[in-house]
Amino acid sequence: MCFLWPIGLSLSASTLPSVILINCDDLGYGDLACYGAPDIRTPHLDRMAREGTRFTDFSVTSPLCTPSRAALMTGKYPGRTGLATGVLRPDATTGLAGSEITLAEIVKPRGYATGCIGKWHLGFKPGMRPLDQGFDSYYGVLHNLDKFETVVFEKEGGMPVLRGDTVEKRPAVPAEMTELYTAEALAFITANRARPFFLYLAHAMPHIPFDASPRFKGKSARGLYGDAVEELDDSTGRILDRLRQLGLAERTLVIFTSDNGPERNTPGTAFPLRGTKHTVYEGGLRVPFLAWWPGRVPAGRVCEEEISALDILPTLARLAENPALPAGLDGFDISPVLLGAKDARSPRSTLYSLYGLRQNRRESFREGRWKLHLGPPPELYDLTADPGESRNVAAQHAAIVERLTARARATREDTGIPATNP
Ligand code: MG
């Protein structure tokens, strides 16, 4: 088939899909109605799941913000970028090196407009910020909004909300963040309607201190936490509506997910999975993942294939038709699974996970149905029979324990995990 295009207009660039990656902060596997929550109403996300695909086995590499985001943004285990342990506080001098290829930098050479809205958490010094990492624009609070950050910025009049590298507003108010970010996202989509774009929308919610705007406060059956999630649902509904209104729905992939499981001692839940953020049980690592692209991502599908945040970068590279992948990737192109190609299976069968904060370390290695927690003592679970990790079968499967321990150690060494946490 042959098309005639005006000289200077790239055929492929004009037909490349736009991508919106919505990353919530500490949203649990069991926090959306379409993942079984009985007490939080998420009609827009439930509709997104009906019109698209709901994945039941998407995992991040680390149950902690900074390492999880480093892996998402680069397609590499966080040890390879020096961000495997700890979280970055506003006074951090380390971060994601400018030489790393990010999601934005993988699509930008293909003519994409790139926007970052919300929590970055991958470095705050010049050279490490979103504008230095392939994003044309940035709006948001670079880090958390909790007590560590509040203290750091007290004398300056409160936590800054940046536009680009300039302070636009102080202080950042938790109850306002979802509305501020949603308005920015809608403006970005409208402004870039005529070209392919990549929008990374990294919400502040429902990370502590979770809060909601007056329209949502006191409305959910799970208290203020549920109110914050219901506002995220409304935000996503407005974004999908805007795409429909602008005629962009059939050329935009929208992903809705989270950076790790729910915080301990909050109303957030990973039910029916075990564990929370700060653990490498499934509840810390496995999070909601909805994909929506009318006409391309199958509608009404529940997909149980094992996929990971590591796989997003190579998949975006494929969708944007950029064959120049960075060296040393740990992710796979999962576009055949995403787009429902006949008999497509995920190329992923293993996942190494590390948690390291202060004195604590937790480590796991998954190989298909088997999930090993290195311990000591080691715990082995059969995720197919026991997704809630309730029956430790390590004693009955010594050979599997030995094999997965060796593979975990090899991954730890290969990815340059430091001997101690910072
Ligand atoms: Mg988080």
Image (cartoon, rainbow, N blue to C red):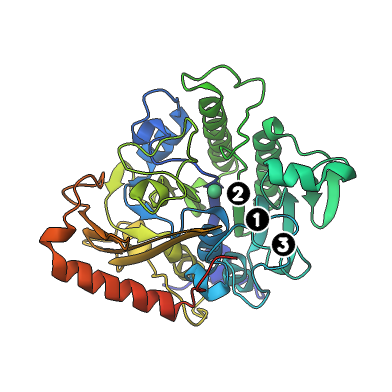
Q: Residue at x 82, y 58 (%)?
A: 165
* Mark 3 and mark 1 residues within 8 Å of each other at the beta carbon: no
The disc at residue 202 is 2
Q: Residue at x 82, y 41 (%)?
A: 158
Q: Amino acid type of disc 2?
A: Ala
Q: Amino acid type of disc 3?
A: Ala
Q: In the image, is 175 to the left or to the right of 75?
A: right
Q: Nearer the viewer, mark 3 or mark 1?
A: 3
Q: Position of residue 59 (x, y in %)?
A: 39, 55
Q: Residue furthest right?
A: 156
In the displayed structure, 279 sits above or below 4; it is above
Q: Image quadrant for the C terminus?
A: bottom right
Give the mark count.
3
Note whether ligand 1 is within 8 Å of mark 3: no
Q: Residues within 10 Å of mark 1 (few under 14, many from 20)?
A: many
Note whether ligand 1 is within 8 Å of mark 2: no
* Mark 2 and mark 3 residues within 8 Å of each other at the beta carbon: no
Whether residue 21 is visible here, answered yes or no, is: yes
* Image quadrant where residue 310 sits: bottom left
Q: CA distance from mark 2 to mark 3?
A: 20 Å
Q: Position of residue 307 (x, y in %)?
A: 35, 59
Q: Secondary structure at mark 2?
A: strand
Q: Image quadrant for the N terminus?
A: bottom left
Note whether ligand 1 is within 8 Å of mark 1: no
Q: Which residue is mark 3?
A: 92
Q: Residue at x 56, y 57 (%)?
A: 358
Q: Which residue is mark 1?
A: 120
Q: CA distance from mark 1 to mark 2?
A: 7 Å
* Mark 1 and mark 2 residues within 8 Å of each other at the beta carbon: yes
Q: Residue furthest left?
A: 396
Which one is nearer the viewer's eye here, 46 or 85?
85
